[in-house]
Amino acid sequence: MNRRESLKALGITTLSAGVLIEACQPKPEYADTAVAADAGAQTDRQVSEIPRDKQLQSEIFFTPHEIATITVLGDIIIPKDDKSGSASDAKVPDFIEFIVKDQPEHQVPMRGGLKWLDTKCLTRYSNSFKDCTAAQHDEIVNEIAYPQHAKPEMQQGVAFFSRIRELTASGFFSSKMGMEDLGYAGNKPNKWEGVPADIIKQYGLEDVKFT
Amino acid sequence: MGDIQIKKSSKTYDIVIVGSGAGGGMAGYVLAHAGLKVLMLEAGPFFDPAKNSAQLKFNYESPRRGSGTKTRPFGDFDAAFGGWELEGEPYTHKDDTKFDWFRSRMLGGRTNHWGRISLRFGPKDFQPNDGISDRWPITYEEVKPFYDKVDRLIGIYGTVEGIENDPDGIYLTPPKPRLPELFIMKGAAKAGVKVIPGRGSVLTEALPGNKDRGACFYCGQCNRGCKIYGDFSASSCLVIPALKTGNLEVVPNAMVREVLTDVNGVATGVSYVSKEDMQEYQVMGKKIILAAGSCESARIMLNSKSAAHPGGVGNNSGLVGKYLQDSTGASQSGFLPQLLDRKRFNEDGTGSIHVYGPWMGDNKKLDFPRGYHIEFGGGMGMPGYGFGGDTPILNGTVPGRDGKMKKAGGYGAALKDDYRRFYGTDFGMAGRGVGMARIDNYCEIDPEVVDKFGIPVLRFNYKWNSDEINQAKHMQETFDRIIHEMGAIPTSGKHGPEDMWGLEAPGRIIHEVGTARMGNDQKKSVLNKWCQAHDCKNLFVVDGAPTVQQSDKNATWTILALSMRTAEYIVEESKKQNI
């Protein structure tokens, strides 16, 4: 099969078609031999994965207060701008809720970190973090967002903020909105011909000989 | 009769193969096409990439955004079931040694997720003359015709380079480098490190004479399995085509317990437990081929004890499980400040390697034997879990858009912009090298522990020594030079003697071989040069286990070539009724 036929086999008729519909393969010729193919193995999932994912989806880890705080913090880390929406627009809090159940090592640092932040804010501003003013948010976040410049007594907050910042970036830029923001152009059938000539020229790489 | 019984098949197959990966798949392919009646036992489920691959899904279709789990360590869409830990299937370690054993129990085995980096061993790999490495009982010239046939049957891209110990194959056009890879080539040239086009088993062009497999459409996702069979997996390229001959049957979810032998020590069949009904089965074969993976095959042999084979079948020499070798591995990553704000385009390319650094070193001038190759990569890949993790660190290392330096870290609109600026500027390089074959690196049967099927498990004993540690140090020094000449900034932490220069634990590179080495002397080897057990002539082993001494090349292409060679030998000898 050449590339055109490959794509046809995939149910994709033009190179611009981006989304793969279920591959429409002919019925395998060996279906009537003694192959005891896995019944129901029509997906890429292992038998143990499906119930585990269902279980994780059905559990709730964060309290409503915690999720509200994550939402406020997430939008401080990744706000809406002229190119794309905010972390909560991309449903980052839902992703964080899932991932701490999937990777339980996040649970104590996240729960404890949120509590650390609330306690600091209660002491300083007599409010939990989410109910503080924008100026108060900026003030405290500034003290934990720059690891090399943070005061020793704020280091626990730095560790927490670094973690939630990583999770927020993961959740935002792996979302559809985030990928579009970044301009990720792949995951679609194409013919790779190498780096476009104008870009090779831009970086002065014309002399790099490949073959 | 109680409720537990052994179900015996009445049929005697010409061949029973244990395992469906590169070695078992190739043996099944050759033997079924030769007209022999073949039964293949696979410990996991049937898997057809055409139906079961997660190809072309976006990471947002995964609730974990593509991150790995214990049973999917290379990511949520990676094709390989299993991992370094399997539920109910433990393994143990002797003393404080470490070996991580990766198992993928499914049709095609670990060929489902591998990097498709396909390399021939060279003349000096089979017949090393360094006075240290053990020699194989065969030469490159003897294996070359089989490498050629594997190239034509499966398809591989690359370039003819004429490097003595990286022999050329029969190649399709290689994919061009991605942008960071062009910087790598330029920097490596300045650093005096040879870099050539990659060699990968991906169909960059239609494979001549093959109507069942499609040409690559460059999604860069070979590790998810390819729905159009555009890359090499043992399932799509070997087992599924072999099924179409009508001469091969596959029994999935069949966890093999032992090889059965008669009073004379001749192999008669295999016993297994079915994961579907937990019943015990016995199937009979005139010849038995083990291809369960180097360590699993050794485990089966050691567990196959009888009066004729008190130490396990094939183990008269006492060497089954010994000489276990995994490749060395160490890596570094960095980013190219020159590429900040780079223009976007689809840079997925293939899911295998685009640029490759062969070993060109002269060991006379070095403090370690043998060498390593370097795998390079970089580009604007699909964002997923972990995206931009370094950005709040790296944004303190370069001036911002306004030309001013700023504090690392941050939040808000400025940080959001930094994530965009840094996208696609990163790259990585990983060394993969020779782990020396030593009798004191081994797996054996743990005297006390069984798995959930009641099968005694493996206990590992493995340690690196200065041969590997000094090699890792050399890797790091080479990476440092390349990164410096690229004008790039390293992002991985510094390595030193305290972490063995970043040398990965044995087993992490998943290239384990050597547990049933071949040789001409029955006392010093398990198999003869046809991968046939010295003490059980109708038993063969065709995975990585026959390896005498691994090389700096990944083992798969050699497993395929040697399995094909053994299968053809079986066909010829069967005709002569010698076995």
Image (tube, helix red, strand yellow):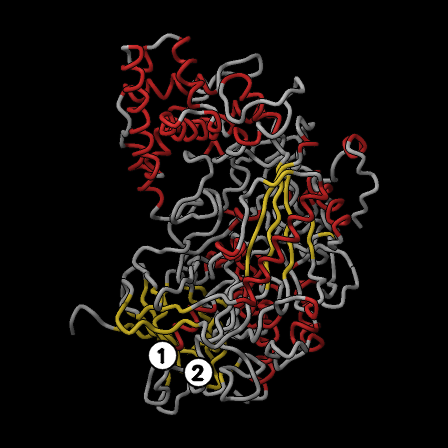
Residue under the image location 71 percent in, 44 percent down: B184
**Residue nearest the observer in this picture, A44 or B425:** B425
Q: Amino acid at mark 2?
A: Gly
- Count of picture labels: 2
* Picture quadrant of residue B327: bottom right
User: Does A92 appear above or below B315?
Assistant: above
Residue under the image location 38 percent in, 75 percent down: B270
Residue B215 placement (x, y as % from top left): 67, 48
Tag 1–tag 2 contact (CB < 8 Å): yes
Marking on residue B515:
none
User: Does B121 appear above or below B305?
Assistant: above
Q: Amino acid at mark 1?
A: Ser
**Residue nearest the observer in this picture, B558 or B408:** B408
Q: Residues within 10 Å of mark 2 (few under 14, many from 20)?
A: many
User: Which residue is denoted by mark 2 in the rendering?
Assistant: B314
The answer to whether residue B396 is left or right of residue A200 is left
Please indicate, yes or no, whether residue B94 appears anywhere in the rendered image.
Answer: yes
Q: Secondary structure at mark 2?
A: loop
* Picture quadrant of residue A100: top left
Subunit of label 1: B
Asked whether the residues under marks 1 and 2 belong to the same chain, the reply is yes
Residue A26 placement (x, y as % from top left): 54, 47
Residue B22 placement (x, y as % from top left): 54, 63
Q: Residues within 10 Å of mark 1 (few under 14, many from 20)?
A: many
**Residue nearest the observer in this picture, B49 or A152:** A152
Q: Secondary structure at mark 1?
A: loop
User: Which residue is denoted by mark 1 in the rendering?
Assistant: B304
Q: Earlier in the sequence, mark 1 or mark 2?
A: 1
Residue farthest to the right, as pictured: A207
Residue under the image location 29 percent in, 29 percent down: A112
Residue farthest to the bottom, as pictured: B264
